[in-house]
Image: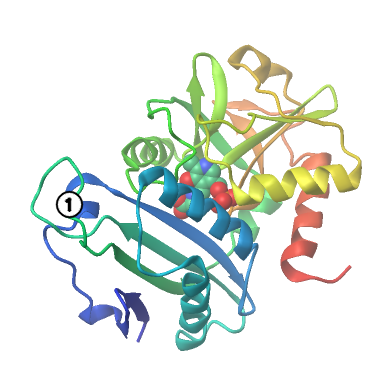
């Protein structure tokens, strides 16, 4: 039976309940994180915690649990849920707590709701071998996409658009520019140069994105944090998306047209192999 953490207690998932007035439910007033677990170890935990800390500060959320507590709870959930071997994810959500509905903040002393769970995760290696297809979708999100808020309606609509079209992911387009995927960041190769949308309020600064950029530097791959535009898409030599639940995933078709030679790109796979070393160790 899966054990979760809710507001100070470790309890079976099936017995966990939330107040109907929880502001996460009423307003989407909260933040979340998804962290990868490989053989019991949290992948890039400090980066996830740093991003969480920034999100909490920007949203003016003050949970009782410190970032150190959250890391400790994650470790306990990994053990309690038998994830010390193989792959998993830890999910965390912090909302502004339960209080009678007002748009402004609830009374001082209202306790933030803190929910965490750990579950098995099946890595999509089969998809990586062939590469995936994606479609573009208008970026209808707000202008603080850098905060990992649970208010995910545009991401839900975008990902459903991908599912409706039988493809892996939707790629957001804002003012003619590719920003990121519904739950991934995007990288492209044009004229041998790796590019991604610069860190800003218009994308979520992905942990996997940061690691990918680090790996590109280590491998000597020319890299520039600059966006590409819709009119650049036919010139893409390679394209891939990154994220905690996708690693580095080659994209071989975009809006029904092949990317490059229609197979996972060379730079993409060099980066994935370097990422796999980080994830799994070895040479
Ligand atoms: N999503 N961009 C968006 C909009 C995301 O939601 C995510 C992650 C990423 C990749 O970030 P990271 O590399 O830190 O996972 C980029 C998570 C996995 C989710 O919503 O399930």
> How many marks can you see?
1
**Residue 157 x/y as whole percent:** 34, 36
Tell me the SS state at disc 1.
loop
Q: Is residue 243 left or right of residue 74?
A: right
- Locate residue 169, reporting x and y percent: 50, 40
Which corner quadrant of the image does residue 22 belong to? Answer: bottom left
Q: Is residue 37 above or below residue 55?
A: below
Q: Residue visible at 22% across and 59% down?
A: 97
Q: Which image quadrant for residue 133?
A: top right
Question: Quadrant of the image for the N terminus?
Answer: bottom left
Quarter of the image for the C terminus: give it. bottom right
Q: Check the image and report above or below for 79 versus 104.
A: below
In this picture, residue 170 sits left or right of residue 29: right
Residue 12 in the image, given as x and y percentages of width and height: 29, 84
Q: 135 or 138, which is in the foreground?
A: 138
Find out if the beta carbon at label 1 lies less than 8 Å from the nearest ligand 1 atom. Answer: no
Q: Is residue 224 visible?
A: yes
- Residue at the image point whose x is 14% and y is 65% from the top: 19
Estimate how packed mark 1 is, as few (under 14), some (14 to 19) or many (20 or more) residues with alpha carbons within 10 Å.
some
Q: In this view, does 178 lie to the left or right of 188?
A: left
- Residue with the mark numbered 1: 106
């Amino acid at each position: 039976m899966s054990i979760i953490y809710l507001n100070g207690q470790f309890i079976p998932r099936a017995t966990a309940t939330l107040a109907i007035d929880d502001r996460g439910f009423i307003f989407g007033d909260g933040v979340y994180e998804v962290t990868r677990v490989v053989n019991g170890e949290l992948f890039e935990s400090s980066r996830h915690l740093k991003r969480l800390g920034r999100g909490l500060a920007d949203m003016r959320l003050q949970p009782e649990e410190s970032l150190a507590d959250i890391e400790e709870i994650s470790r306990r959930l990994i053990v309690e849920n038998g994830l010390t071997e193989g792959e998993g994810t830890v999910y965390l959500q912090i909302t502004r707590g339960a209080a009678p509905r007002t748009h402004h903040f609830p009374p001082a002393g209202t306790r933030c709701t803190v929910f965490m769970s750990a579950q098995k995760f099946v890595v999509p290696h089969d998809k990586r071998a062939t590469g995936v297809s994606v479609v573009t979708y208008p970026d209808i999100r707000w202008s603080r996409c850098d905060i990992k808020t649970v208010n995910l309606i545009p991401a839900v609509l975008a990902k459903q658009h991908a599912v409706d079209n039988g493809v892996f992911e939707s790629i957001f387009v804002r003012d003619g520019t590719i920003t990121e995927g519904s739950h991934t960041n995007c990288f492209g190769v044009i004229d041998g140069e790796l590019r991604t949308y610069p860190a800003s309020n218009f994308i979520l600064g992905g942990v996997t994105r940061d690691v990918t950029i680090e790996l590109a530097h280590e491998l000597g791959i020319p890299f520039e944090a600059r966006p590409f535009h819709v009119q650049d898409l036919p010139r893409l030599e390679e394209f891939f998306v990154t994220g905690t639940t996708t690693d580095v995933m080659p994209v071989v078709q975009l809006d029904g047209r092949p990317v490059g030679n229609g197979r996972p790109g060379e730079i993409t796979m060099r980066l994935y192999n370097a990422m796999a070393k980080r994830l799994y160790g070895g040479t």
